[in-house]
Amino acid sequence: MKRYAIVGASAAGLSCAKTLRALDADCKIDLFTDEAYLPYSRPIISYYLKNKVNAQQIYLQDAAFYEANDITVHLNEPVTEVREHALQTQRGKRYGFDKLLLATGSVPFVPPMENVGGQENVFTFLTMSEAERLKAYAEPDMHAVVLGAGLIGLKAAEGLRSCVKSVTVVELAGKVLPSILDDRAAPMVEAHLQANGIVTLLGDTVVRAEGKEKITSVTLKSGKTLPCDLLVVAVGVRPNTALAESCGADVNRGITVDHETMETTVPDVFAAGDCVRSLDILDGKEKIIALWPNAVREGKTAAYNMAGVPEKDTGSFAVNAIDFFGQRICTCGLINDDSAQVLVRADATQYKRLLVKDNHLVGFVLINCSARAGIYTELIRQKTDLTALSGDLLKEPGLMLYARDVRTEKLTGGVRI
Amino acid sequence: MKKVIAREEWCLNCRLCEVYCRTAHSVSGDVVRAHLREDPTPVSRITVEGDNLDSVAVNCRHCDEPACVAACITGAMQKDPETGIVTCDESRCIGCMTCLAVCPYGCIKTGKAAVKCDLCQGTGEPACVKNCPNRALVYVEVGGAAK
Amino acid sequence: MRYTVPEFEVERNLQRCISCGACVRQCSYGVHYFDDDGKTVLADESKCVACHRCATICPTHAIKIKAFEMAYKTHFNWTPQAQQEILKQAETGGVLLSGMSNNKPYPIYWDKILLNASQVTNPSIDPLREPMEIRTFLGRKPKKLTFSADGSLATRLEPQVQLETPIMFSAMSFGSISINAQKSLAMAAKELGTLFNTGEGGLHPALRDFRDYAVVQVASGRFGVHKAYLEGSRFIEIKIGQGAKPGIGGHLPGEKVTVEVSNARMIPEGSDAISPAPHHDIYSIEDLRQLIWSLKEATQYKKPVAVKIAAVHNCSAIVSGVARAGADIIVMDGFRGGTGAAPTRIRDNVGIPIELALAAVDQRLRDESIRNTVSLVAAGSFRNSADVVKAIALGADAVYVASAPLIAMGCHMCQQCHTGKCNWGIATQRPELVKRLNPEIMSQRVVNLIGAWNHEIKEMLGGMGLNSLDSLRGNRLMLRGIGLNDRELEILGIAHAGQ
């Protein structure tokens, strides 16, 4: 009987476990997490914060699933060491394995700030336990400061808006969501955030906090001082590679893997998800692509190869769908590629930006017009030659873009009726 | 598994499939009430694209390896291993719409949650097929997908 | 200013309209349209032709088409319709055109003829329990049969066409109707064991598999006629005239001559397809004889050759001549026969009823002892199985139907065939309309219709105590007239009810 160990119980870890079970009914699967929760959805914690879901609705599968699929989940059991087909946990237990998956995800990055460390009202916003702590702490008369206007920071801000008196987002970059929005889209999103009561301060950052045990205010680089009853630090995340490094795997910001099999440089040790250097199929560059669908796919690919079933990974690229206060944002691929031709269609509330390079769609930004966006994503994924399409690419996309025989093949899968 | 197959050459662009899809997924089950009284108006899970000359009805292909399921951050989107039907548990969906961003057929719609074709689960022939006036939609065994 | 008022009115039940827009997208005449709000559906009633496509497809039955009622000062001669027609001509200066068939209230003799049934003295037959023969053979029959010493048939039989029902589908060309409509008829003919007719449109390549169920026409334009066309058919029909427009040729406007039509007809794309009023090589019975025998020669005497004429005043004498010219089958098309396009005045005023023509011709051929030399096929509006049974009793061997199967396919008799905008996908070549008619569905509806008629014919035969259609052919004792005068009864060759 094969023994598989998986460290990390989020998207990649669970996907790997499920796939392994589907491939091999008899194998032993151990899933280790340093958290107190069965696998849950990390992106959902902002919805938990604003009471859109309760603490029971965060789980990806119910407890019965793990029993039915004979997956042993080791809660609160951080893995401290990996050596020669065995891992050691903080509790001092040793578990042998034939193949190991490192799905350790990422850890929040807290930049150096004066008088911030050790204060009780400083939070990150990556895990359920932090969300629980934040929810318990927040009171309606508080002033909240969120450092960082990325996806996590803005989601935290949105969630906090209903819990506290004021929310101020401080972002060092000159625009909100700098990694996924272009210069025209970002102000639209920012305006919508402001209309919903979020204060935004761009091009600025927190340098110092006032208060003992508890922050009472923060001082910004600009010299501005903000009252602050709680501070959420969401400037970014770093791949969690400590365990990989300890077992001798090659790490270069993220864990280095074979992009086809997800195996690390240490034989029988695989890695998937946010902790890995993925290959962006759009520009051929290695990068951290810390996104859910990417983690699920990599976990699955790893499972196949761990089970000895050759299965090549199809490669990654960025796709983001998110909404803030009802404004829908959907982005994909290369957003800020200066060499691409840009097609834009916009009005007061909607914005569509398509990036075309060498007759191929390479990226898009959609604000409040994401209907059927997956069709664009598919054009990007398949690297479809746009000259083979007909119709206006800027309108709501559809299969009518394709030539008739192509769309018939797509729709019928070759079934002739 | 059985899937809805569109036969483009017979599609009239009448869009009755959309009407009957909305009705089948309404609270009242009545075509007039579904469209005029219910709030929100039910969302059609099937979309007719094109014009009178060239049109085709597109709905979920219930893929063998559904991108929407892989992309779902809550576990709401699942493919039933027995029937092969991909459904969204609307009580678990938080409406992030990542599924919409990855569906290659553009078959996920935005309602209160992500909304998609469930093949009218358990009611036999789906409403779109049953009510297509020109047999442009057929419900046939295509093999493969379901285990 | 237009002096004509709309003929119809669109009544939309706003409590039921869900603004789905099916009517907007389905109306080829552009009657329905969305208001600027994209929700309210409005109607330009002046364009409505009452084809009922919108009302039929509306998922909530929110649409009713009503007559646009205008009060006129009563005048029994200058009816509103008479006035409207004058206004139309005053506006356009053109010949009034119509589709389908004569819609004047001339007598319908079928409705003045009653069938007999058995009571006591001869038993009626239950067709569900006993065999009932409606198989029909068309072609020249021998005067008498001779047998060899060994009992085998010595008489050489002329080619015969076997039909499993006395009902065939009349000529409707590809061009006048869509390929899907024609294919529906072809598929139905195959399933029913009967024949469809290509009209003067050639044979579309899509119908090659149905050649064994095709009657091919040779008409005055000779469109699409070639050796394979003739040889592929079950029989050949020379078209002299048509009941809806006797004495008139045909004119398929160039815009309807699509690539496909041009291929089937073997004429240049976009050119008007003009069928002359006469065949310019037939000015006499003798000329007709030449064509009949040429066609027989071309097909090695393997196929019957039919001649179709419109029922006109002297049809008895004409049919006698045609029979003597060598025709194996003679088709007579009464004045209620349909058309894709005809001048309204011709349609409504020329020709005679098929009932009278059939009775007169059958009697004439009997009187001349040449009835066996031809099969008689009656055409020109058979609305139901009882009309068919009465025609057989008046002397027809078989009948042609066209309007009835078209109605089965959706035709609502709006009589706008000539506009080419048929919303039902029948009388049109526009691809977006043609595809509305799916032969898979429509052929089945036609099969259902004719299958139902077959059952009813058997019921009526059984009631008369007959177990085969042959026992009814020309058996006018089974008919009685009602409300007819002596002259009419004499021509029909039947007694009055009560006699």
Image (cartoon, helix red, strand yellow):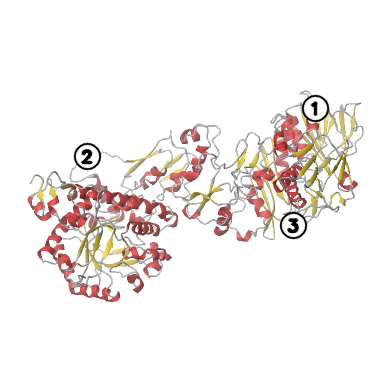
Camera-side residue of A38 and C19: A38
Q: Amino acid at mark 3?
A: Ser
Is the Cβ of the residue at disc 2 closer than 8 Å to that at disc 3? no
The crowding category of the residue bearing disc 3, from other C-alpha atoms within 10 Å (few below 14, some 14 to 19, many at least 20), is few
Q: Secondary structure at mark 1?
A: strand
Q: Are marks 2 and 3 on the same chain?
A: no
Q: Are marks 1 and 3 on the same chain?
A: yes
Q: Is residue C362 left or right of residue B7?
A: left
Residue B129, above or below A157: below
Q: CA distance from mark 1 to mark 3?
A: 43 Å
Is the Cβ of the residue at disc 1 closer than 8 Å to that at disc 2? no
Between disc 1 and disc 3, whose residue precedes? 1
Judging by the rendered image, the residue that carries numbered circle 3 is: A339
Residue drawn at the location 22% of the way across and 49% of the way down: C386
Q: Disc 3 sits on a residue from what chain?
A: A
Is the Cβ of the residue at disc 1 closer than 8 Å to that at disc 3? no
Q: Where residue A13 sits: x, y (%)? A: 77, 43
Q: Amino acid at mark 1?
A: His
Q: Amino acid at mark 2?
A: Lys
Occupied quadrant, residue A216: top right
Q: Nearer the viewer, mark 1 or mark 2?
A: 1
Q: Is residue C150 left or right of residue C230?
A: left
Camera-side residue of C96 and C383: C383
Judging by the rendered image, the residue that carries numbered circle 2 is: C73
The crowding category of the residue bearing disc 2, from other C-alpha atoms within 10 Å (few below 14, some 14 to 19, many at least 20), is few
Q: Is residue C376 left or right of residue A110?
A: left
Residue C15, above or below C1: above
Camera-side residue of A190 and A360: A360
Q: Secondary structure at mark 2?
A: loop
Judging by the rendered image, the residue that carries numbered circle 1 is: A143
Q: Where residue A332 sits: x, y (%)? A: 70, 49
